[in-house]
Amino acid sequence: MSNVDYAPRTAAWRALGERAGALSDVTIEALFEADPERFGAFSVDGPGLLLDFSRQRLDRRAVSLLLELAAQTGVAERIGQMFGGEPINNTEDRAALHVALRRPADRPLAVAGTDVMPLVETEREKMRSLAEALESGALRGYTGEPITDVVNIGIGGSDLGAVMAVKALGEYRNPVPGIHFVSNIDGVELSQVLERVAPATTLFVICSKSFTTLETLTNAREVRAWLLAHGGDAAIASQCVAVSTNHEAMDEFGIAAERRFAIWDWVGGRFSLWSAVGLALALAIGWRNFEALLAGGHAMDEHFRHSPFERNVPVMLALIGIWNRNFLGAGSHAVLPYDDHLSRLPAFLQQLEMESNGKSVRRNGKPVECRTCPVVWGESGSNAQHSFYQLLHQGIDPISIDFLLPAASGVDRQAQQDLAAANCLAQTLALAVGDPQAATDSPHRGYPGSRPSSLLLFERLDPATLGQLIALYEHKTFVQGVIWDVNSFDQWGVELGKRLASGLTKAVSGGNGRDDPQPIAGALDRLRAARPR
Ligand code: F6P
């Protein structure tokens, strides 16, 4: 990207700054009064969902400038490059082709001239046959008893997506297996899970793209010792499967060749739920439902690839985020789903957005010249209302918000879902309109209003809709990365902490203190004194 089309130096960026200034005293209520067609003009239908951004603090001119910004920063070209398998992850010289993972097998997609769809289909078939064997009771452990439980051992992108989706699709789960997740390094989850599952009937999925991640390997080694103690090598052979790009490390661990699932370096961890990284999910909900999730993701890909930007939900969601972040100063972004099934969505989006776009260096290595990814956070409504909404309504800092709302109850409690809907809409209304008058009685009671939010509305949370939602946020993240000119597909910022931790392991458990790095020497001393020996 040259400096001419670098977002902060474009004419559109300058004009957007001016537009934000011109609108700074205009209330959201006034925007509605000035434009009776506002809902129609400020909402977009995508596959399976509606994006209503009419309560954002912008007008038609601002929207058209945002669209100009997308044009001036080459978003269309970059979308073409992504779907074309070009190495858009430039710091690692890799493609970012997660869209292949949810694409129908008979539609070729090439990386460096080679169609990857046959590879994808081979792994899908392996996943399908494992899921079907489990469902039919044919998948058995070392004693010959059918598998009843599945434990996914992975972290970050090898955990968060599956955790989120297993919770989201709780009503689509098969009665067997029980699904468990172990990610953290401290051994707490591991202990709790091993207490709950039986050695003879539990399948362990070791999920690590690199197969070098300390947390995953530590937990996996503990599991291997536990299985060996109960069932010997036969238990490892029949009850451990692995998902990775690293075949040598899987050899070393003793994963049987027929128990391996491949992924590829053109899939980023946080974009990998659709691959065998989603195996635990596929085993939980069955293959047909997993395929419906893939189809939902693919439908969003088609919409993203082919819709004009003004009718393109991921592009519009990204542009609204840019408006709030770069022109209205929102440093954080709250995701508030009004369906408890989506309670882990904020955690998933934290990795997706913050690991992708939490960067201060441009693709060409120069410092960025604008704000990039906001802090992403959230909680399901209405729990969140009784926790932090005080700050949303009366706090100081601007915060951008996505509300998510299904119309139908996922648990056949429509009257309660209607209450959830009423609460969700009440909040978006209260934020937009406020009640400044109330301040005349007491300054503590006033609601300033004009606090913007978007609403993603969908009929019901089923596998296809979840696929659409995840792909929507993936593409939103990508488009924002293009506009900020950061590489959304690397994560160099996580390496230093890992390196330092491996150097400190000995110091924690018994160093003599001589080589302790000064900024943590005092803390290390205290820790050594306090830890049990
Ligand atoms: O430390 C961050 C990270 O590299 C993430 O990007 C990734 O999703 C996670 O660790 C797990 O990595 P792996 O799948 O290689 O174990």
Image (spheres, helix red, strand yellow):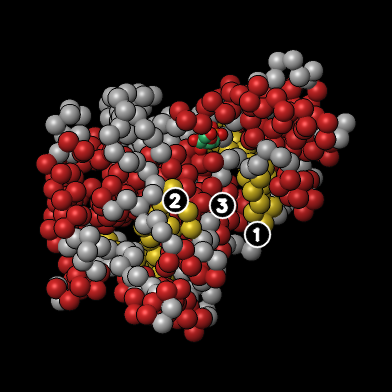
Q: Where 189 sits versus 312, above or below?
A: above
Q: Earlier in the sequence, mark 1 or mark 3?
A: 3
The one nearer the camera, 92 or 508, is 508
Tell me which label, 2 or 3, sits earlier in the chain. Answer: 3
Q: Nearer the viewer, mark 2 or mark 1?
A: 2
Q: Residue furthest bottom?
A: 415
Give percent across and percent down for residue 66. 18, 51
**SS class, disc 3:** helix
Q: Quadrant of the C terminus?
A: top right
Residue that label 3 marks: 163
Residue 5: x, y in percent?
A: 16, 34
Report the amino acid beneath label 2: Val
Whether ligand 1 has any atom under 8 Å from the Cβ at mark 3 is answered as: no
- What residue sits right under mark 2 in the picture? 376
Disc 1 marks which residue?
Answer: 176
Toward which corner of the image does residue 205 lie, by quadrant?
top right
Using the numbered discs, state the Cα–Cα distance from disc 1 to disc 3 in whole angstroms: 17 Å
Describe the element under mark 1 as helix, strand or loop.
Answer: loop
